[in-house]
Structure formats: C-alpha cells, structure tokens
C-alpha cells in the first residue's frame, strides 16, 4: 500500500470520528482546565479575596459598625454582609475569565483553543461556568464565615444564591468580552478599577441609599449595581432599597446582552481571529 | 495509480489587512499522503494562509476545504482533522507537561490516556519532564511539547509552521525523521520553512509564495530539473588562451579567474542533458592548447539558489510595475 492509499484510509476513518464529535467533551475539558487554573493558585484566587473582604467586615462591621444605628431594623453587621459578598462575587467572576483568556493571548496558548473543534458558544459556556464557580466559591466562603461570626443572613438563601449565580454569569461574560478586546493588561484592569469598584461602593455596600439626601438618592438609581446589591440583600436579610425583581430583571437583560455580544466577538473573530 | 480527492483544496483565497494584500488569489491543492512545503521570505503570507486553514483567521475571501469540508461552515469537522504547530513558542505556565497534553487532547475528544501521553512524550524525549511545570522547559523542549500537542489527537493533516526555527541540529534531525515516519503512517504534512534544506530533504511538492502571490507549485524534482543548473569549475595551470575563448564562444562558459573556466548548463533541456557534451568539448580544447588541468569541481544548484532566483525575479517584476 502506498502513502496516498494509506492516507486516504486514515482520512476516511478520521472523518467518521470527526462527524461524531460535537466537542462537548472538549468543552468539559476546557471548563476543567479553567477550574484547575484557579485551584492551582488557590491562595491568590480564593483565600486572598476572602481575607481582604473579611477585613472590610471586621473594620466596618465590628469597629465602626458599633456606633451606627440599625438600618431598617437590621443590625449594621448583618446589613453589610450581602454587599461584601456581592463585591467579591463580581470581582472574582470578572477576573477569572478576563485574566485567563487574556493571559492565553499574551502567552500564545489561545491558538490551541481557537484551532480546536470547540465552538464559540462552547468556549463561552466553559469560561462562564468557571467564573460562576470561582465567584460563588469566594462569595460563599465570605457568607459562611460571616455566618460563623454571628451574622444573620439566611432570610431567603435560594434568592441569594440566584443573585450570586446570575451576577457571576454577567461579570464573567464581561471579563471575557474585555479580554477578547484588550491588547494590554491595562485594558483588562480598566473595568474593575474605573467602573466596577466605584459603582459597587456607590451601590450601597456600606449604606442604604435611603440615608442619602436628594439629589444623590435619585442619582443612585442610575447605578445598575445598586439593584444587584439590593437583590442579594433582600435574599440574605429581607430588606432592600429597590424591589428585588428589578435586580433580577437587570441581571437577566444584561446576561442576554452580554451573551449575544461575547458570542458575536468570539464567532465573528473580531479582534481575535484576525 | 489511483488518484484521490485533495485533502486540502484552496480556491481563490485572498486576505487583505488595510493596505497590505497578505494573500492574493491563491489556488492550489494538496494530495493525501504528501509532504507539501510552502516556501517564502518573511511576510510572504505563509502563516496567514495557515491561519485561514486552521481557523485562526476567520475572515478571508475564497474557499478552503479540508477532506471536502469547508473550513468555515464545517469548522468542527475540519479542525478535528487538523494538527497545528504554530511558529511562535507558547506554553501554559500553570500546568505540567502531562496536564497540558491531557487538556489539549481533551479539546479534541481524546479521553485521558496516560499511556498514549507517555508514549508521545517518550518519542520526543520529554518523558522525564512529564511532571515538570512547562515554565521550566527549555526553548527546544517547549517546541517538542507543541509538536506533541498537535499529534495527540492523530490528525490526518499536520501543519508545521517553521517547525525547526530556533532548534538545535539534534532536534532538527529527530524531527525530520519523525516527519518521514508520520508520512509513512498516512499523515499528510503541510510545512512552511525558511530552511530550504528542510524542504529539499522532505518535501514531495513545493510551493513558492512571495507578497501573498503563489509564484510556483511543482514537484521538488521538477523544480530542481527545471530551474536547477549543473556546473563544473575547471582550474588550469596556465591562463586560459584567447583561442580557447573564441573556440568556446557558443558554450555557456564564464571565467571567474584567468585560469578558471566555469561551465554551467540547465539540468535538462529539450535536447536532453548537454552538460557532458560541453564538458568534453572544453577538455578537448584545453588539450589542444596544451593547458594542464590541476583541479575540477562540480555540483548542482540547490533549492536555495533556485528559490532566491525566483523570489528575486518576482520582486524585480513587482518593482517595475
């Protein structure tokens, strides 16, 4: 048998296998790789953000919190837990996908993924799932430790978890979109430093917007993070600045928008397959 | 001999980056089981073309199919059939060599198989580094790992983009022998290279590309026969006489030194091989002059010189336009 006959036989067999492969196992392996990546540096990706958030809890909750009256009938220490959890959730979900995807671009390993049979939608799913796990893990640990320290935050756990998962999904997608568009690390850091951090702090992590004078109270309503924090606060302690369904609506709408945009970026190859 | 449908079919492919025409209406095919070498200077469009085939570049004009499947509309199938070793070294510093292969195989539906991973690592001398973080591998080892990654899912069409760039002679020889071995197993190989020696040694067919344009595509031997020249350099004891030069006016002869005669002729022309006849005439005329021969050297032009000639002629043509 000559080389071309042998090659032809090999091609025919490979086509049969390739037609069967829908890349779902590949998607799972990509998800697993992303999980292993953050687990391999667990101290940096989970322990460190948990510790730094708990410092906020200790300083604002126990030290300064003693001199603050109850807010809407809830102790201040309980009041700040949902906001701190959400702050950690969105930051970690964002950085998980953004850092991993962008480092792949810098080191050139993104080529291995883009040349593989895993589709754009499957890439998006794997990175989002990993962001959800990391975001919920760090947020969940903060929630757990706060509970062990005496915070009473189990009003509606299912609603709290729903907000955490949806927020992770939205900010994981945002991180992925930014990593696709970014050409420098500075671009990846822009959103957390100049958008997420200010909006989170001004979104009522440490205070209720009902305490703000006008026009600041009205202005606060244009901040989408306010609705997300209010939603998880409703789930954890049963109070919120705005109805929690508004938070859910914002998360669902932004999930759909970012899902479509990130899929477009991945599928069209804009800034990526050029 | 039975002919098969091409494993790679490139039709009218063009790619433009702003004012740069990276690929200009390329059309050619690659047959199953052959080693095809695409040669071209830096920036000729070799890597861009591979990018279009492998899915790294999604927007281009024209059509490309692999084993009859379009690379855009049936990308999940074509990518499964392709193995790709990029030109730039890459590594994932979070994982060990074994883990990297485990994940890379997984992307292509290869279930965890330590035996297979260890076999391929052993083939490329990386078995000792299986559980070492890829950050700690040398440049040559990283190159080997990239080849292992491309082979793990048993591709039928393997793209090697400058595979021996920056590797030592030992790895280069190992790789060449591995490529020949892959060909024997029925893998079709598409190779780009700067090292003409590599193409001359391995390739069945050669394409030459310059400024995005395909200048030539031929069997290796056909290129050497069509463009190659055979030469003889004769050094004589005394300077070559004017009588000799007059007598040999019709022969393709140059005189690099006063006592040197350089005879060059095409490998083959329409009348067959003339070089021996010319050489005989030279020897007869030297004998008539009583000029003693002290040294004779000879050879044939390499692919490298042919390549330079073709590319340089194209660059001059482009400059004139």
Image (tube, rainbow, N blue to C red):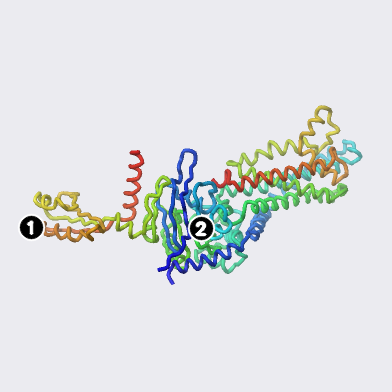
Rendered location of residue B118, percent (x, y)? 56, 67
Badge 1 crowding class, 10 Å Cα cut-off, few under 14, some 14 to 19, many 20 or more, is few
- Horizontally, is A81 left or right of B61 in the view? right
Let me know if residue B53 appears in the view. Answer: yes
* Residue at mark 1: chain: B
Q: In this view, does B30 lie above or below A52?
A: below
- Horizontally, is A30 left or right of A5 in the view? right
| SS state under label 1 | helix
Rendered location of residue B314, percent (x, y)? 35, 45
Q: Mark 2 points at which residue?
A: B66
Q: Which residue of the protein is positioned furthest toward the right in this rendering? A: A73
- Horizontally, is A40 left or right of B56 in the view? right
Disc nearest the viewer among 1 and 2: 2
Badge 2 crowding class, 10 Å Cα cut-off, few under 14, some 14 to 19, many 20 or more, is many
- Residue sitting at x 90%, y 38%: A72
Rendered location of residue B90, percent (x, y)? 53, 52
Q: Which residue of the protein is positioned furthest toward the bottom in this rendering? A: A1
Q: In this view, does B224 lie above or below A173?
A: below
**Quarter location, residue B114:** bottom right
- Residue sitting at x 67%, y 45%: A260
Q: Mark 1 points at which residue?
A: B288
Pointer 1 and pointer 2 on the same chain: yes
- Residue sitting at x 82%, y 31%: A217
Rendered-image quadrant of the C terminus of chain B: top left
**Quarter location, residue B183:** bottom left
The foreground one among A235 and A47 is: A235
| SS state under label 2 | strand
Q: CA–CA distance between discs 1 and 2?
A: 64 Å
The foreground one among B318 and B232 is: B318
Rendered location of residue A58, percent (x, y)? 81, 43
- Horizontally, is B321 left or right of A240 in the view? left
């Amino acid at each position: 048998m000559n080389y071309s006959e042998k090659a032809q036989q090999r091609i025919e067999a490979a086509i049969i296998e390739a037609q069967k492969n829908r890349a779902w196992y590949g998607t799972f392996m990509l998800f697993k790789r992303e999980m292993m990546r953050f687990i391999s540096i667990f101290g940096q990706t989970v322990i460190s953000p948990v510790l730094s958030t708990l410092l906020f809890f200790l300083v604002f909750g126990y030290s300064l919190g003693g001199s603050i009256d109850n807010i809407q009938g809830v102790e201040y220490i309980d009041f700040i837990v949902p906001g701190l959890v959400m702050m950690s959730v969105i930051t970690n979900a964002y950085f998980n996908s953004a850092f991993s995807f962008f480092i792949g671009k810098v080191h050139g390993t993104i080529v291995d993924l883009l040349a593989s049979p895993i589709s754009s939608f499957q890439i998006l799913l794997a990175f989002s799932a990993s962001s959800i796990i990391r975001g919920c893990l760090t947020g969940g640990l903060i929630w757990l430790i706060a509970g062990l320290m005496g915070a009473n935050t189990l009003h509606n756990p299912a609603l709290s978890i729903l907000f955490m998962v949806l927020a992770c999904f939205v900010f994981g997608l945002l991180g992925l979109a930014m990593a696709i568009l970014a050409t420098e690390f500075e671009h990846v850091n822009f959103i957390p430093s100049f958008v997420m951090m200010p909006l989170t702090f001004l979104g009522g992590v440490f205070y209720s917007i009902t305490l703000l004078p006008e026009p600041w109270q009205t202005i606060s309503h244009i901040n989408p993070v306010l609705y997300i924090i209010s939603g998880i606060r409703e789930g954890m302690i049963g109070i919120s600045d705005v109805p929690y369904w508004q938070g859910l609506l914002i998360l669902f709408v932004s999930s759909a928008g970012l899902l479509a945009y990130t899929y477009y970026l991945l599928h069209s190859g804009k800034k990526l397959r050029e | 001999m039975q002919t098969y449908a091409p494993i790679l079919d490139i039709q009218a492919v063009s790619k433009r980056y702003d004012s740069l025409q990276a690929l200009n209406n390329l059309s050619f095919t690659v047959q199953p089981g052959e080693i095809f070498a695409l040669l071209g200077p830096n920036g000729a469009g070799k890597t861009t073309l591979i990018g279009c085939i492998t899915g790294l570049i999604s927007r281009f004009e024209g059509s490309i199919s692999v084993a009859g499947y379009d690379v855009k509309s049936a990308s999940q199938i074509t990518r499964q059939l392709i193995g790709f070793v990029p030109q730039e070294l890459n590594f994932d510093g979070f994982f060990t060599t074994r883990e990297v292969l485990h994940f890379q195989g997984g992307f292509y539906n290869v279930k965890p198989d330590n035996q297979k991973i260890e076999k391929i690592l052993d083939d490329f001398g990386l078995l000792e580094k299986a559980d070492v973080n890829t950050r700690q591998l040398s440049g040559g080892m990283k190159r080997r790992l990239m080849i292992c990654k491309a082979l793990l899912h048993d591709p039928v069409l393997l793209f090697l983009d400058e595979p021996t760039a920056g590797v030592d002679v030992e790895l280069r020889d190992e790789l060449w022998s591995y490529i020949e071995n892959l060909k024997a197993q029925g893998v079709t190989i598409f190779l780009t290279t700067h090292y003409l020696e590599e193409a001359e040694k391995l390739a069945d067919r050669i394409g030459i590309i310059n400024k995005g344009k395909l200048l030539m595509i031929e069997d290796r031997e056909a290129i050497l026969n069509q463009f190659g020249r055979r030469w003889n350099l004769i050094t004589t004891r005394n300077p070559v006489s004017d009588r000799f030069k007059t007598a040999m006016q019709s022969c393709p002869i140059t005189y690099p030194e006063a006592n040197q005669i350089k005879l060059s002729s095409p490998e083959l022309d329409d009348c067959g091989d003339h070089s021996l006849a010319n050489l005989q005439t030279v020897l007869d005329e030297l004998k008539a002059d009583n000029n003693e021969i002290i040294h004779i050297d000879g050879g044939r032009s390499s692919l490298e010189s042919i390549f330079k000639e073709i590319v340089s002629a194209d660059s001059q043509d482009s400059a004139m336009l």
